[in-house]
Amino acid sequence: MRSTNYTLTAAKLNAARGQEKPYKLADGGGLFVRVSSAGTRTWCYGYVAPSGKRSEVTFGQFPEVGIKAARDLHFAARQQLAAGVDPSAAKKADREEKRRAAMADDGLFKTFSEKWLTEQLGDATAPYQRKMRSLLERFVWPSIGRTSLADVKPYQILEIIEGQALKAIPGTAEKVRALVQQVFDHAIRTLRVEKGANPAAAMTGVIKVPPSKHHRHLTEPELGVFWRAIAGQVDGAAHPSTVAAARIIALTLCRKTEALKAEWTEFDLKKGSWTIPAERTKMRKPHRVFLSRQAVAILEAQYALTGDGRWAFTTSSKLSVPISPATMTFFFKRLKDVPSDFTPHGLRGTGATILREHGFRRDVVELLLAHTEKGVAGAYHHHELVEERREALQFYADLIGKLAASEKVSVLKTRRAKAA
């Protein structure tokens, strides 16, 4: 094949500007650049096809497709032509083959469920998205990932949820089944499979899930023991930030991760408030915590330790990372005289139960826990009950102090004779 004397340079192409009408810049051997009125520069190859008709094939735009890349494509097209193949027709056929392959791949369970994760769980928290992807990666994709949606049968779902990997963990097995059902429900809504053809729905009830165990919560005397046990960790047994974080979790009824990833910009200690941003709350809504005097004092002392950094609670000497959830869980496990099955999350149930027992209204406690009402009630109840929430957390902080002061404590007088 005869070599081509190319003439275009990068300087000439960069200088090319759009004119009233499109024009061509010849490079050689039929290769040229078409400059549109808007200034777009497109590589083109004009040739006589095997049919005898003049034809043209494009290679992309400059500078995305550079001079060398365009000339390599030009050479390949000339080789096709020498072999009797029309380069333009070959390009269209290759594009169609890729389109069909993509369509076929799109119908596979793995490809479709990956899109479902992105499109349907886009608003979910990052940890939840990772959890759902992990379930698919570990238990589902190895079995039916390369199977067409329409070809997945109930027996295959049964094999997954009753297989060796999930046999000993029925709770996870049911989560996997429900997850697959959600994917197929979406496939039905998008007309990928026929209505009623949900193989995971057919397996509903096959897995017998034992009743869930609620997080252990503390009685009032146990809460006093817990608070004294934390105090026992102050003198070097645990990092001051870990101790402070544990106390703030107890005094605010917040979730463990909400406290551990708290940033100093979220606090207004003068006003006694902490606003947890929506991206860190389970309900994906900002949550305001009205801090008790005791909580403010703890945070003021903590600011002296970590106030120069981003995170409120960090054990890093460079203040560069927040305390990990595992560190806090381990801290709870080594507290003296505290039940071994008590976890940080149990402080939410502890506080909620005690406040209700002392007469605080259910609405107040639910707002303290950042729970969202569902249905019609949730649509109309926009109140924040600020003063009652502030009073509740102050009452609770005072009560904890009293409980911790003595093993034989005279509990604070109940706030109301009867809970609402």
Image: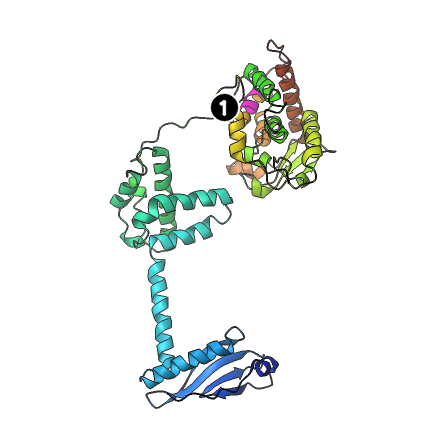
Residue 399 in sight: yes
Q: Quadrant of the C terminus?
A: top right
Check residue 351 for magenta coloring. yes
Q: Position of residue 197 (x, y in %)?
A: 30, 49
Taking depth in this image into account, of 124 and 90 the one nearest to the observer is: 90
Q: Nearer the viewer, residue 189 or 405?
A: 405
Helix, strand or loop for the magenta stretch, by majority = helix
Q: Residue at x 35, y 28 (%)?
A: 210
| The N terminus - image quarter | bottom left
Task: Please identify the residue farthest to the top as the structure is shown.
Answer: 408
Which span is picked out in magenta? 350-354
**Horizontal arrangement in the rendering, residue 81 relative to residue 383 (left or right):** left
Looking at the picture, does residue 16 appear above or below residue 202?
below
Instruction: Say what amino acid the circle numbered 1 marks.
Output: Phe
Residue topped by disc 1: 342
Q: Does residue 197 show up?
A: no
Assess disc 1: are there few (<14), some (14-19) or many (≥20) residues with their C-alpha within 10 Å of its C-alpha.
some
- Where in the figure is residue 386, as x and y percent of width and height? 67, 31
What x and y, as percent, mark residue 108?
Answer: 33, 55
Please, which residue is most extreme toward the right here? 270
Give me the residue at 57% from left, 34% from top.
370
Q: Is residue 268 above or below residue 235?
A: below
- Quadrant of the rendered image containing residue 284: top right
